[in-house]
Amino acid sequence: MATVKPFKGIRPPKKLVEKVESRPYDVLNSEEARAEAGDNEMSLYHIIKPEIDFPIGTSEYDPRVYERAAENFQKFQDRGWLVQDSREHYYIYAQTMKDRTQYGLVVGAFVDDYMKGRIKKHELTRRDKEEDRMKHVRVNNANIEPVFFAYPDNAVLDKLIMRYASTESEYDFIAPVDGFRHQFWVISDEQDMNVITEEFAKMPSLYIADGHHRSAAAALVGAEKQKQNPNHNGTEEYNYFMAVCFQASQLTILDYNRVVKDLNGMSPEEFLAALQVNFSVEDKGVDLYKPQQLHEFSLYLDGRWYSLKAKPGTYDDTDPIGVLDVDISSRLILDEILNIGDLRSSQRIDFVGGLRGLGELKRRVDSGEMRAALALYPVSMQQIMDIADSGKIMPPKATWFEPKLRSGLVIHKLS
């Protein structure tokens, strides 16, 4: 069973939400955060990217930067830019991209569920990135940014959410940069909160969709606090961390594409010939060409697009990993032909989220920065859940969720 609870969120007043809210810390660099914050002293970047308060070039891992995060978090509360709710709530967070809206429940997720595998992951995490976020959680004694979970579709919760969605929201704004609509409701009715708690308790698992490092950091800090407290009894707020949970069928996963700097010493003709061993290769001409189905890839090379269809026998439909297009392309193209084995460390490859479109792949190749581009068919949420259930791990850079959660709509304090 999945254990969740409501919490006393720390939130900006309605009139200030667009001043405070920001993109997540990990989707932009320090200079982009500095530019977006500008002269807005209420921007959450002063808490989640506090290196912008220091001279250009200051490391985001400088101890002074973590200390400044805590100072700014306190300042935001002292000045009324962030205010804690007087009682516990669940919250609803809706995101609209084009004509699709997804509705998430903001909950306190149970640390022990993560530690015991009831909150399931599909990606590996890096200890250095975990430690960075753990320092941020420790120094603020809070989950400043939420993590992004999925749960199996639930008719009871869907009906409850839609009832709130028909009412006026607490927040409603179009975010700069991404141009998506973001709405937020406060659930204060005791009966509704009990229903949410009870429906989650019926679920065997929750699934991390995005934010594996934040999830690990939040849970590990909670586990630390359990061990450090000689009077720990399990009711403390640090036993929970903040997550936004969406019904799996509502989520949009975009393609996560690859661009490579060289052909491993081969000519274009030799490269195309090597591909024909495991793929049916078809020249699609100069117009942008997007993969139409699983196990089909689009290659952009020397101003032309090609369809690559994996031949039968090159993948295993019974293996939740082996059936993935990210695995097929990694094994049969990047590793076997181009000799790019470690996607996390190789300097010969880069990754482009599908929101940027095929035009971005074409631009980077045509500019001479990259030699070729490979577009993939998107992974499905069901594939992710199957992999997580099997206990296996996806290849790196396999999923790109959009829209991203905005930060600063609500914060969870650990005490």
Image (cartoon, rainbow, N blue to C red):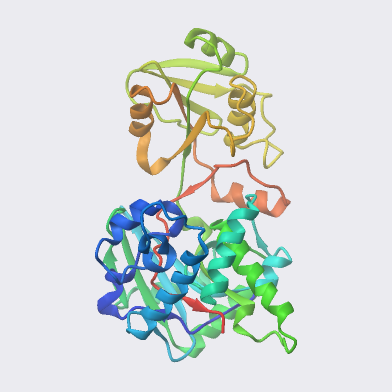
On screen, residue 106 above or below 285:
below
- Residue 2 visible from this viewpoint: no
Q: Quadrant of residue 200?
A: bottom right
On screen, residue 370 above or below 51:
above
- Residue 281 visible from this viewpoint: yes
On screen, residue 156 above or below 280:
below
Q: Where the N terminus falls, by quadrant?
A: bottom right
The percent position of residue 389, horizontal first and vertical second, equals 69, 54
Q: How many badges with numbers are in the image? A: 0
The percent position of residue 332, horizontal first and vertical second, equals 63, 24
Q: Is residue 355 left or right of residue 381?
A: left
Which residue is located at x 51 percent, y 31 percent? 349
On screen, residue 363 above or below 193:
above
Q: Is residue 388 left or right of residue 52?
A: right
Q: Quadrant of residue 328?
A: top right
The percent position of residue 314, horizontal first and vertical second, equals 67, 25
Which residue is located at x 27 percent, y 70 percent? 19
Given residues 220 and 314, the one toward you in this image is: 220
The percent position of residue 367, horizontal first and vertical second, equals 33, 24
Q: Where the C terminus falls, by quadrant?
A: bottom right
Q: Is residue 386 left or right of residue 381?
A: right
Which residue is located at x 61 percent, y 31 percent? 330
